[in-house]
Amino acid sequence: MSNEVKQYDAIVIGAGFSGLYMLHKLRELGLSTRVLEAADGVGGVWYWSRYPGARCDSDSIYYSFTFSEELYKKWRWTDRYSAQSEILAYLNFVADELDLSSDIQFNTRVISAHFNNNKKCWEIATNSGETFLAKYFISGVGCLSTTNVPPFEGAETFNGEQYHTGRWPHEKVDFTDKHVVIIGNGSSGVQATPEIAKEAAKVSILMRTPHYVTEARNRQLSKEEQDQAFANYNQIRECYINTSGGIDLLRTGKSAAELSEEERKKLLDYVWETGGLSFGTALSDVAVNKDSNFIVSQYVRDKIQEIVQDEETAEQLLPDYYITTKRLIIGTNYYETFNKDNVELISLKENPIDCIVEDGVKLSDGVMNCDVIVYATGYDAMTGSLLKMDIRGRDGQTIQEKWKEGNEVKTYLGLAMQNFPNFFMITGPQSPSVLTNMPAAIEQHVDWIADCISHMEQQGIQTIEAEKKAELSWGLQCDEIANQTLYPETSSWYTRANLDGEKRGFVIFVGGLHNYRSICDNIAANDYSGFTFEKIPTTVITE
């Protein structure tokens, strides 16, 4: 254990997409920076989420940094949707190309971060006993990094193997001749289930709420397609800046009412056959019009019944919420997997989990013996990673107190908070974050934060923090926009309802990344309106 105090201009938490780019930008400004990372390598969520079938759900050619054309054109993606191993290799490539690793401290977990109002700096303590002092404290932990493991009674007594998709072992897990129970059917469950079913003797999926799963149509990219991506760099960069999601998706610009039934069927067939996330964008009013949403939702429900052979199983797999108001999941052979003889579906609404026992999972109708339990239960999304830390602003106010344990989130732009000077959140709650292609949202946030810090350094500014009225106004603006859509109609992890079923308000800016970018840029151009600055005191020398 070390008691040494180390001083930097900036401390950044996390070495995923956010932390790597933030480090690069801060070094360009000439600021001494240290990235603290709990893992023993870069990657962020892609370091931990090594479960079978793990892939991104944005087309790979968009799931990259675009701030440097030279860097972009040095990496060729193998598949349309890249696997975890390739994404991790890409982030290591970026770290090597930009020579970042020397300023990253691995195997280091932040225990606390307290703002010292006398020194006007952050005091950060780690699990190794080190203390860091920094003018700027920046979170790059992301929205989906803290796993959500339901507190099932008796889990510690289970004699078999237990895994969480968000904390998967580095070595291969062998499912041969084993009965595997998968609890959860969100994105990780959808991706893992078909792969595990190829190997296991039996797979039992315990599902609480069925989700819409559309086809990914993943495939290898040809050299011609890779070359075309390089040739289209400017267009890809343009999508990052001027689209709602930071990615090119099919948009007809027409509502469902503007198309005939035959035209709608042809359009939705095309989206299904070509794969991807365009069910949320092909029709202009899916997110706001219940009738249009029903048409798209029913199309996917019909596909489920068409694919799944057992009528009872198909019925259990039918979602009843508005499509896209929970994360739209893309999968490969997910529904087809339920036609396999070694796969069964159990509805937890009809047969809930009582507890975990030595031999398996005790349901209301008895014990299901098994060899392996896989928790595909997702993350404590949006706020969980920050709420897990001891972060304190002025006068010792904790982030838990400010956000009332996540029940009343208050930020300005999802970037900063009143009473937490010089603390920045990359893709924090109340920003577009998870409704976008994440690298696009990350680049926008990091660029804005770096420009803000550059302004502060040039102007001799000691601290910046959000004004209380700006926080309140931003929260109202986020709610107002969300309430014009169908998103608040559904309980989801967008509202953190995946933790206990209780909705906590919608903590995402749903107005689109392009509009959000304009708002942020206008605020910066207007002398950072909504923020309060404190100048570095001028030392007066008297004789």
Image (spheres, rainbow, N blue to C red):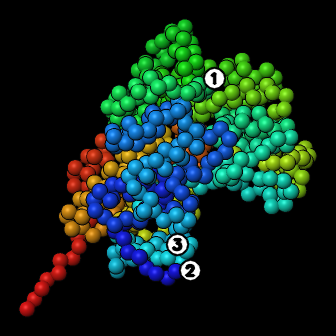
Up the image or down, 117 lies above or below 210; here it is below
Q: Which residue is mark 1?
A: 300
Q: Nearer the viewer, residue 100 or 8?
A: 100
Mark-to-mark CA distance, 1 and 2: 56 Å
Residue for point 52% across, 15% down: 267
Picture coordinates of residue 392, whole percent (x, y): 47, 71
Asked if residue 487 lies left or right of residue 135, the reply is: right
Q: Pointers 3 and 2 in contact (CB under 8 A)? A: no
Residue for point 33% across, 39% down: 69
SS under mark 1: helix
**Residue 378, can we see it?**
no
Q: Nearer the viewer, residue 323 or 17?
A: 17
Q: Amino acid at mark 1?
A: Val
Mark-to-mark CA distance, 3 and 1: 48 Å
Please identify the quadrant where the C terminus is shown: bottom left
Picture coordinates of residue 83, whole percent (x, y): 58, 38
Picture coordinates of residue 124, whole percent (x, y): 46, 72
Q: Pointers 3 and 1 in contact (CB under 8 A)? A: no
SS under mark 3: strand
Along the polypeptide, which appears first: circle 3 or circle 2? Answer: 2
Picture coordinates of residue 112, whole percent (x, y): 51, 71
Q: Which residue is mark 2?
A: 1
Q: Amino acid at mark 2?
A: Met
Which circle marks residue 126 in the picture? 3
**Residue 187, can we see it?**
yes
Residue for point 48% across, 12% down: 259
Along the polypeptide, which appears first: circle 3 or circle 1? Answer: 3
Q: Quadrant of residue 265?
A: top right
Up the image or down, 193 lies above or below 11; here it is above
